[in-house]
């Protein structure tokens, strides 16, 4: 079978770089990379080069949440106000508590009505008091609306529960035990990883991470006065600092290790990261679209791209009319997450029934729509490993 990457490279409209790793519980099965990690430096992409993987970051954040639940430091169904230190409520539904389960599954009634990339000195409590961040038409728990702002709240809860910075919690609970040179916002990654970061492009222009092998001067959104002093961090004050919704830097090979762990019921190379019960929770949808595109709809499907969702997990091939959520085109149920930002498209998908999975990303992805789903043509090709 001809690799999708080779076919993409031969097309007129092609990504700048693409990586695809297939795997099973035991290890990698195939590895394909093509293109340039850095066009200006003519640096060829490698399977170990980290990239800002976008919204797959949410799934990885959820792994740490579930580890804290297993340690009885968090509770999926408790009012998060308990940890935040202030009452979090949709002002239109002040009697409805908001839980980690609702935040992780995008049913909290929060919206991205403001810019969720907050400056370093932002106060999340004040941000959440803005009426523009709330859906006043749907009570918490009744409507799916994919919302990045849910994850700064989750990160703030994690910080308050542990007393640690979100990026350091992720390092301790996920990256170190999984032997991953990965990080959020390039703070805890090794110098070697930072030197190999993949530059992001859209339509041939740099969109981010053109650091020429050096660490960024300020790895987070600077404070409003332009300063960047991470020593001023206070637990839970600004959960957006390390971009828990999209700021994970990880290689295609590292992403495959995450997939292997999930496929092996929470273990990787004999080391248990999650309990089987936690993996079962991840495999369980919390919301399924009711098929209604009108006033009776129970969620926004992104034109059929998202029809089922769990605890920071998307599910593919939903058998509901109007769903176009199967970039593989084979009708097999899979779960994982997609990523889409700054011209990059990414995916981590596992097929537990057949015991295999795929991790992929591409930079400077053309806008060409897919032919089989609501995903792009490039994503369909990378998912399937066949000609687009």
Image (spheres, helix red, strand yellow):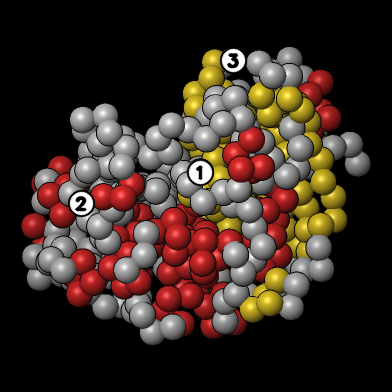
Element at label 3: loop
Q: Residue at x 12, y 49 (%)?
A: 126
Q: Residue at x 51, y 69 (%)?
A: 173
Query: Label 2: which residue?
Result: 124
Say whether marks 1 and 2 touch (CB < 8 Å).
Answer: no
* Image position, residue 75 (x, y; %): 34, 79
Quarter of the C terminus within the rendering: top right
Q: Is residue 101 visible?
A: yes
- Other residues around mark 2 within 10 Å, as few (<14) / some (14–19) / many (≥20): some
Q: Which mark is residue 92?
A: none
> Observer-nearest residue: 286 or 332?
286
Q: Are marks 2 and 3 in contact (CB under 8 Å)?
A: no
- Residue where numbered disc 1 is placed: 186
**Does residue 122 sit above or below 337 in this rendering?**
above
Closer to viewer: mark 1 or mark 2: 1
CA gap between label 1 and label 2 equals: 22 Å
First in sequence: mark 3 vs mark 1: 1
Nearest-to-viewer mark from 3 and 1:
1
Task: Name the element at disc 2.
Answer: helix
Q: Is residue 165 above or below residue 217?
A: below
Q: Residue at x 21, y 30 (%)?
A: 225
Question: Which comes before the other along the chain, label 2 or label 3?
Answer: 2
Residue at the spot of label 3: 204
| Displayed quadrant of residue 39 | top right
**Neighbours of disc 3 within 10 Å: few (<14), some (14-19), many (20+):** some
Q: CA distance from mark 2 to mark 3?
A: 35 Å
Image quadrant in which you'd find residue 381: top right
> Given this view, does label 2 or label 3 mark the residue nearer the observer?
2
Task: Give the spatial CA distance, label 3 vs label 1.
Answer: 24 Å
Residues marked 3 and 1 touching at CB (< 8 Å): no
x, y percent for residue 304? 48, 45
Q: Secondary structure at mark 1?
A: loop
């Amino acid at each position: 079978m001809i690799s999708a990457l080779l076919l993409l490279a031969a097309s007129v409209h092609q990504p700048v770089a693409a990586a695809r790793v297939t795997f099973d519980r035991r290890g990698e099965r195939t590895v394909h990379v093509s293109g340039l990690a850095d066009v200006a430096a003519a640096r060829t992409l490698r399977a170990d080069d980290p990239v800002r993987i976008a919204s797959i970051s949410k799934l990885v954040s959820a792994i740490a949440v579930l580890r804290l639940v297993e340690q009885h430091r968090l509770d999926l169904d408790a009012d998060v106000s308990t940890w935040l230190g202030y009452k979090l409520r949709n002002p239109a539904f002040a009697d409805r508590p908001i839980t980690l389960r609702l935040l992780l599954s995008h049913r909290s009634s929060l919206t991205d009505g403001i810019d969720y990339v907050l400056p370093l000195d932002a106060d999340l409590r004040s941000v959440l008091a803005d009426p523009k961040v709330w859906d006043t038409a749907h009570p918490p728990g009744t409507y799916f609306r994919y919302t990045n702002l849910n994850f700064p709240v989750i990160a703030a809860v994690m910080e308050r529960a542990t007393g640690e910075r979100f990026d350091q919690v992720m390092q301790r609970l996920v990256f170190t035990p999984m032997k991953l040179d990965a990080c959020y916002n390039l703070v805890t990654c090794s110098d070697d990883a930072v030197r190999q970061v993949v530059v992001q492009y859209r339509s041939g222009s740099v969109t981010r991470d053109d650091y020429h092998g050096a660490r960024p001067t300020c790895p987070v959104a600077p404070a409003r006065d332009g300063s960047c002093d991470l020593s001023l961090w206070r637990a839970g004050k600004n959960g957006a600092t390390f971009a828990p919704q999209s700021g994970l830097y990880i290689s295609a090979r590292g992403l495959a290790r995450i997939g292997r762990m999930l496929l092996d019921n929470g273990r990787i190379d004999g080391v248990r990261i999650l309990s089987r019960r936690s993996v079962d929770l991840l495999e369980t949808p919390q919301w399924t679209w009711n098929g209604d595109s009108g006033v009776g709809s129970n969620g926004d499907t992104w034109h059929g791209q998202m029809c089922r969702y769990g605890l920071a997990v998307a599910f593919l091939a939903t058998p509901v009319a109007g769903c176009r959520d199967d970039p593989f085109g084979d009708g097999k149920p899979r779960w994982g997450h997609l990523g889409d930002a700054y011209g990059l498209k990414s995916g981590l998908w596992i097929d537990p029934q057949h015991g295999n999975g795929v991790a992929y990303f591409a930079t400077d992805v053309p806008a060409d729509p897919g032919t089989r789903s609501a995903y792009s043509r490039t994503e369909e090709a990378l998912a399937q490993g066949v000609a687009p």
